[in-house]
Image (spheres, coloured by chain):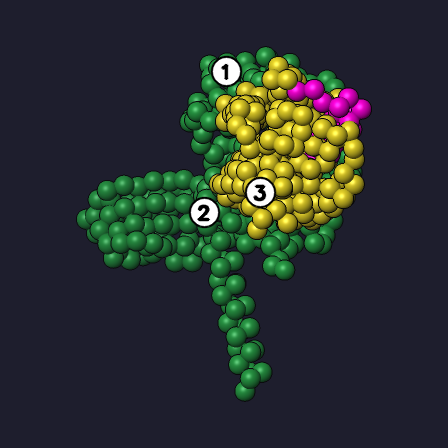
Amino acid sequence: MSSATSLPGRVWQQGRYETLTMLRNGEQLLLMIVLPLIALIGLTVTPFLDGLGPNRVDVAAPGILALCTMSTGFTGQGIATGFDRRYGVLRFLSTTPLGRAGLIAGKTVAVLAVLAVQVVVIGGVAALLGWRPDIPGAIFGLVLLGVGAAVFTALGLLVAGTARPEATLAVTNLVWILFGVFGGITMPSSKLPSQIAGIVGFLPSGALGDASRAAFLHGTIDVPAVIVLLVWGAAGGFAAVRWFKWN
Amino acid sequence: MKRVLAGVDFVARAGEVTVLLGVNGAGKTTTLECAQGLRRRTGGAIRLLGEDPQLATAELRARVGVMLQEGGLPPSAKPLALLKHVAGMYRDPLPVDDLAERLGLREFAGTTIRRLSGGQKQRVALAAALVGRPEVVFLDEPSAGLDPQSRQVVFDLIGDLRAQGLGIVLTTHLLDDAERLADYVAILDRGRIVAEGTVAELLGTATHAARRLTLRGPAGLDLAQAFPAGGGLHVLEPSAGHYQVDGELTTAHLASLAQWLDAQGIMPTSLELGTQSLEDVFLGIAEASAAQDAMAHKEKSAHREKETA
């Protein structure tokens, strides 16, 4: 008689499959690894971040790692899920023992696995460039990156589950660029034009960027930023559960 | 909320092929989706292996294989890698290599699903539905896009599954599929079942008798005169010069037809004897149901007029 693999087994299977799919996709690699690396090097060789920390890479790296969570969770998963939805892949997988909950859990595993690869690669390059994060702060920082990845994944799935895949592709890429440059994630609000500096702290990008810099750079917890991030996560998660369409 | 299905009652048994037959938009896919638990129904009851599909557990889903109409396969994946992935969701899946062999997937094993033909994709989707050794399989339009050879492979496989005692529910808009595969047919039209039974039963319930003579020749003949009056035959000229005679035809009828043609000096261009096909039943039912709807509509508007008067 037919029976299902255990729940952890199914989630692991799906997580591994999605991780490999993401890492094998050229466009995804560009978004997840190459562009953040270019931004990291750019911010290290230019004077944009001068005066905020002991040296440029110490200020740049936490923001770039925060940007990575947006690449993987929001844009990467958004686009992949949008097209999987179009092709009926979500529907098919939800008829297998994996089910809908297993599918979401598998995606979470994949996002965290890719994030781990990003932290190793980008953190490694940053270390070569002289990054020396605050060690206790870095532990909280890594937890924060995980939370940020979850928040951006919820938002990415919200877009993927409600818009057409072409629209999801356009929106998640555009938001990635806008938030990446002006959203307070790589550039702290103090370095942004005054018209937007006041609001970026309320964006998920600004909140994660600020909290990440506070942790890695100063070894502190930016409580207001963490709260803003959690509120976005709760709202995004609720909306995704409420409005996500499987077909 | 729009009511999509009403009065769709049927039982699909183990070891049988149950065919939902209907034109596009008749409600076949919606029916399957409700049975698979993919779509929330607003009323009625469905039991899948004794459980409510809407509350399906992983264990229930493991016993049911699904092939969706659009396939549901990721375009960037390669067929065997995808099958191995799906197989990983089951404790004791079929060996992927055997399944690939049986369905002829080896010849395009290295090609991404995006680049496969419609028929090749169908075969991969069928393999994905079967890899978990299901007890029940739902196949939405399994013969769509298949060339005659793949169609034979798929039909043989469906026959084997039936012989192994699986319950198979499939949809099709092709009467030929139903005639070749079905143990039980439910004909769907605009969201309801308008006829059901075995193929033989459906042919028996036809409004015309099961034998038909088709003749082609000059237009406008009074062909009814060729047969003795009161013989229970039904003579029609559906299009100019094309005649149909339905009824319990006997050799005496043929003799009198030949005599009459000879007397008139008419040589038909074609003369054919046959039985009625499922297609005739299907078209007859569709026509009757359309007429019924038109009548109901008329009554409704008459009623409305009365109310406003």
Up the image or down, A242 lies above or below B222; here it is above
x, y percentage for residue A10? 72, 24
Q: Which of the pair B57/A54 is nearer the observer?
A: A54
Residue A184 in percent (x, y) is at 62, 40
Q: CA distance from mark 1 to mark 2?
A: 42 Å
Residue indicated by mark 2? B280
- Chain B tint in image: green
Magenta part of the chain: A131-148
User: In the rendered image, which residue does mark 3 sit on?
Assistant: A192
Q: Position of residue B307 (x, y in %)?
A: 58, 83
Q: Do the CB atoms of the residues marked 2 and 3 lie less than 8 Å apart?
A: no
Q: Could you say whether the residue bearing mark 2 is in a helix, strand or loop?
A: helix
Disc number lying in front (2 or 3): 3
Real-space Cα separation, disc 1 to disc 3, in angstroms: 52 Å
- Dot 2: within a 10 Å radius of its alpha carbon, few (fewer than 14), some, or many (20 or more) residues? some
Examine the image and state in which quarter residue B170 appears: top right
Q: Which residue is mark 1?
A: B109
Choose mark 1 or mark 3, whichever is in front. Answer: 3
| Horizontal arrangement in the rendering, residue A197 relative to residue B54 (left or right) | left
In the rendered structure, are the residues bearing label 1 and label 3 in contact, judged by CB atoms less than 8 Å apart? no
Q: Colour of chain A?
A: yellow
| Relative image position of residue A73 (x, y in whole percent) | 63, 33
- The structure residue drawn at horizontal position 22% and vertical position 51%, both measured from the top left corner, is B218
Q: Type of residue at label 1?
A: Ala
For the point 70% across and 54% down, the residue is B42
